[in-house]
Amino acid sequence: MRNTASLVCLSLITLSCQTTGANHSSNDDLIQAKPIQTPSTSVEPVTEVAFLENDCPGDTELPAHLMGQFEPIDDQELLQSVLGKPNKGALCQGKVYQSVSPSSITVYRAWNSTNTHSEMGTWWAGEIPAGLTAQYRTDYEICYQWSPLDKMTQCTLKAGAKVVIGTGQSAMCSEYLTYPASPEKQIYIQNASDVLEDCEQYDAVFDWQSQ
């Protein structure tokens, strides 16, 4: 049995390492390895994908009540600008649409009364907010620090307005709270103040229900 020894590498192409130490002999102490073969073909760089549609719950088709009121259009730049990475919010998947004429599309936005500029924000819904506030936050990935949801505005979308309709990406609000990606449809309106009309404001009120 030989003493503990260190390995000394003599070559990187033909690896030849031998033990050094007391009382070693024989070819057992010589380790021979074949040269490493380097592939001759080049490897194409991997392009990062903003989202994988199969990982997103739901789909990008129009809800039943909006059928016939939009037509799909191609605007990849707009679409890519609203797709978010996991835990960062925005959309998980989406499709660009344009409202047709005549338009009778009603959209809704719950917002923060302490920031009046947030009334005409970019994220809207096709259905009026209802049910439990906590569930609404989960469905639409609205972190508590983003909005108290104490105001709601209802508007009509003008004909010819371009929007993105899709399902929400997951959102990490804190180390204790992360909303998962949701199948609920959201409507992204880039220039809401220009393409919305006949708006009405509503206040949130307490309406406690027993469990």
Image (cartoon, rainbow, N blue to C red):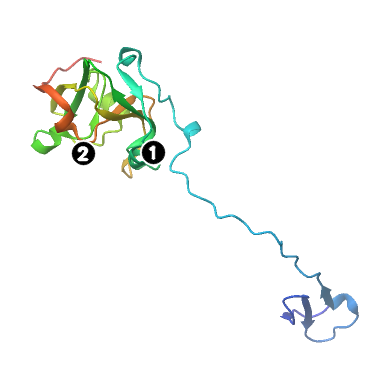
Q: Quadrant of the C terminus?
A: top left
**Front residue of 46 and 56:** 46
Q: Quadrant of the N terminus?
A: bottom right
Question: Disc 1 residue type?
Answer: Gln
Q: Residue at x 31, y 20 (%)?
A: 70
Query: Where residue 45 appears, x then y in whole percent?
Result: 55, 55
Q: Residues within 10 Å of mark 2 (few under 14, many from 20)?
A: few
Q: Is residue 180 visible?
A: no
The total number of labels drawn is 2
Residue 166 is drawn in which quadrant? top left
Residue 24 is drawn in which quadrant? bottom right
Question: Disc 2 residue type?
Answer: Trp
Residue 40 is drawn in which quadrant? bottom right
Which residue does the numbered mark 1 point to in the structure image?
76
Q: Residue at x 13, y 28 (%)?
A: 150
Which residue does the numbered mark 2 point to in the structure image?
146
Q: Residues within 10 Å of mark 1 (few under 14, many from 20)?
A: few
Q: Residue at x 64, y 59 (%)?
A: 42
| Most distant residue in the bottom direction | 22
